[in-house]
């Protein structure tokens, strides 16, 4: 007997009925989990840890954004100044202070607990991202409950949890995973206010929980990444207002009290930084960072349509189902729930496609809407049976392509076949193949669950084994390791030709970033000093050393690859002959 579901309208969730054990172990797990919210939360946390922890502790600092955030936080901890944001002697006013406070809290807590060398452990700076990613998964489940059944909400959360893009952001110590958490919280609260109005619920005294969550999330999002979260909320409200010709539901979010609460949360630091730096923060963050993205900032320009192309990779393994669900979502576009989710998704997506500066993580806060829309179609059993079904092969194609690239890349860079990754690669391929073979409109859940398991094995292979083994991609870590092994105490360094933020983070805030001549002058100023000279700067180093009579030798040479600039580097570690 086939299992059947109630076919809820978006925004009118009902529990599934007449469920019959389908005889599949993975589906039986979901049935067990969905018996209570507590089990769901525990299950999603466990899935998050399995998907996000491989490589979390072992991958060195990644240039440039993660290393910049971590170094600025490290300087906060070193200086005890938790208002100003600096990278060495330069101000870093591109983003507000939120993520730095969270990272500093993790480092300070670890130090208080007795963890040695806490400020140099990059994984501590990633803890807020891990918490943000798992929290966003849980909040996707909570937000989805306003639209679909509990079972459907679990599948929406699993799509987010296993998505490639969130897996990357969960391992990087920067803002985007925590921003996702705040956006999903705000949109989940807004959805409840909107759908209660659409259902005609007469709430003379709306609950305070919705506005409390909504305005607190907005405040947290502003402290993390400035007004970007206001764009998501504002465009959603504007789109719904145009479609409904009314925003009569907004008072349910108590905007007067909520706005005052949001200002109470965000104004203290903005006043403090204005008192400290004047208009510099606002000119740098709004003019120098946000508005500059309208052009091709830092060579990240791309034409419209890039996010749509990247979606099929960054939202894998949910992307094939999302493609198959598109016709059903379009047919349901004027139903309240679908309308809300499309208002969350479409206007902001258009803005990101129109802006010239494009980075994959910009659209991450829109993916929960995609996941919930996909599940809405999945629960109705109305996924497309047309040529779109051929997209199920994508569940196998991504593990296959990723495995080939990872193994070949490891052999090319390290001359090692990374045999430890092969069992995980094989398992990912097997489960990806099962997902492809199992798929039809009645077994989409089974296919998706197999794809999620494939994503888990792929995470162990790529993040847990292959990336930590690719030491040439992280030359800063190799340089720091070489400096730790020198005989003298308290080595000081100057770098020429290789100025990546990860180098400053790993070798110390006092590391001097200079040119070849400056590195020679630095080396001549005392003992236990080292010049880190990239090959392109060696000639100027040698000429200056000859001019000042500097006698030096090569302590080590690090060959690697600068992933920020996309080129090979060769860095010599010079020291004066008087260094002991």
Image: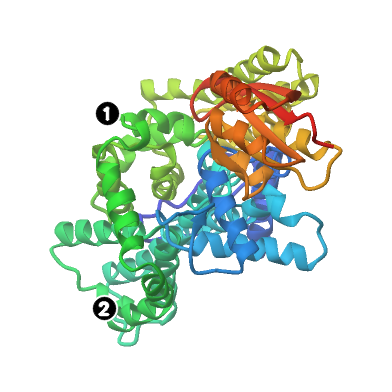
Q: Nearer the viewer, residue 514 or 452?
A: 514
Query: Residue 460: x percent and y percent?
Result: 71, 33
Q: Residue at left 77%, top 33%?
A: 482
Q: In the figure, is residue 262 to the left or right of 304?
A: right
Q: Residues within 10 Å of mark 1 (few under 14, many from 20)?
A: few
Query: Residue 82: x percent and y percent?
Result: 54, 69
**Number of callouts:** 2
Q: Considering only vertical position in the picture, is 419 above or below 23?
A: above
Q: Quadrant of residue 106?
A: bottom right
**Residue 396 visible at all:** no
Circle 1 residue: 303
Q: Residue at left 24%, top 62%?
A: 237
Residue 535, disc: none
Q: Residue at left 52%, top 20%?
A: 567
Q: Residues within 10 Å of mark 2 (few under 14, many from 20)?
A: few
- Quarter of the picture containing the N terminus is top right
Tag 1–tag 2 contact (CB < 8 Å): no
Query: Residue 167: x percent and y percent?
Result: 58, 41
Circle 2 residue: 251
Q: Quadrant of residue 95?
A: bottom left
- Quarter of the picture containing the C terminus is top right
Q: Residue at left 57%, top 20%?
A: 543
Q: Nearer the viewer, residue 59 or 351?
A: 59
Q: In the figure, is residue 116 to the left or right of 297?
A: right
Give whichever of discs 1 and 2 has the lower sequence position.
2
Q: CA distance from mark 1 to mark 2?
A: 39 Å
């Amino acid at each position: 007997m086939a299992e059947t579901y109630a076919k809820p309208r978006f925004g009118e969730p009902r529990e599934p009925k007449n469920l019959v054990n389908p005889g599949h172990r993975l589906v039986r797990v979901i049935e067990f989990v969905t018996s209570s919210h507590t089990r769901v939360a525990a299950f999603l946390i466990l899935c998050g840890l399995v998907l996000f922890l491989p490589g979390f502790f072992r991958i060195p600092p990644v240039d440039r954004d993660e290393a910049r955030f971590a170094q600025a936080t490290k300087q906060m901890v070193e200086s005890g100044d938790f208002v100003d944001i600096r990278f060495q002697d330069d101000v870093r006013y591109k983003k507000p202070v939120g993520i730095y406070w969270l990272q500093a809290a993790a480092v300070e807590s670890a130090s208080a607990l007795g963890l040695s060398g806490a400020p140099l452990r990059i994984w501590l700076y990633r803890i807020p991202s891990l918490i943000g990613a798992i929290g966003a998964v849980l909040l996707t489940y909570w937000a989805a409950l306003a639209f679909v059944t509990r079972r459907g909400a679990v599948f929406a959360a699993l799509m987010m949890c296993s998505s490639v893009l969130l897996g990357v952001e969960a391992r990087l110590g920067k803002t985007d995973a925590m921003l996702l958490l705040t956006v999903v919280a705000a949109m989940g609260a807004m959805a409840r206010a909107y759908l209660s109005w659409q259902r005609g619920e007469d709430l003379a005294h709306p609950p305070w929980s919705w506005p409390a969550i909504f305005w607190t999330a907005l405040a947290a999002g502003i402290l993390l990444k400035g007004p970007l979260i206001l764009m998501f909320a504002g465009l959603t409200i504007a789109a719904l207002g145009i479609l409904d010709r009314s925003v009569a539901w907004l008072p349910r979010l108590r905007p007067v009290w909520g706005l005052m609460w949001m200002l109470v949360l965000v104004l203290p630091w903005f006043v403090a930084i204005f008192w400290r730096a004047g208009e510099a923060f606002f000119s740098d963050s709004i003019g120098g960072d946000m508005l500059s993205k309208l052009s091709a900032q830092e060579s990240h320009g791309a034409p419209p349509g890039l996010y749509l192309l990247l979606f099929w990779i960054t939202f894998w393994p949910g992307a094939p189902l999302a493609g198959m669900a598109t016709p059903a979502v379009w047919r349901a576009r004027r139903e309240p729930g679908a309308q809300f989710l499309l208002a969350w998704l479409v206007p902001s997506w258009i803005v990101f496609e129109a802006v010239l500066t494009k980075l994959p993580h910009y659209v991450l806060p829109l993916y929960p809407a995609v996941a919930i829309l996909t599940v809405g179609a999945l629960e109705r059993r109305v996924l497309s049976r047309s040529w779109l079904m051929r997209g199920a092969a994508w569940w196998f194609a991504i593990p296959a392509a990723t495995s080939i690239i990872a193994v070949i890349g490891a052999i090319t860079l390290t001359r090692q076949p990374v045999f430890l990754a092969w069992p995980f690669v094989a398992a990912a391929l097997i489960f990806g193949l099962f997902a492809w073979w199992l798929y039809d409109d009645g077994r989409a859940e089974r296919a998706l669950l197999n794809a999620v398991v494939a994503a888990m094995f792929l995470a162990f292979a790529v993040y847990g084994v292959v990336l930590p083994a690719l030491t040439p991609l992280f030359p800063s870590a190799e340089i720091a390791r070489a400096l730790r092994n020198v005989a003298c105490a308290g080595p000081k360094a100057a770098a020429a030709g290789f100025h990546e933020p990860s180098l400053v983070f790993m070798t110390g805030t006092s590391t001097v970033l200079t040119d070849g001549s400056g590195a020679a002058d630095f080396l001549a100023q005392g003992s236990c000093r080292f010049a880190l000279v990239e090959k392109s700067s060696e000639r100027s180093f040698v000429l200056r050393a000859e001019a000042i009579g500097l006698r030096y030798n090569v302590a080590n040479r690090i060959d690697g690859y600068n992933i920020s600039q996309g080129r090979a580097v060769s860095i010599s570690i010079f020291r004066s002959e008087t260094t002991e």
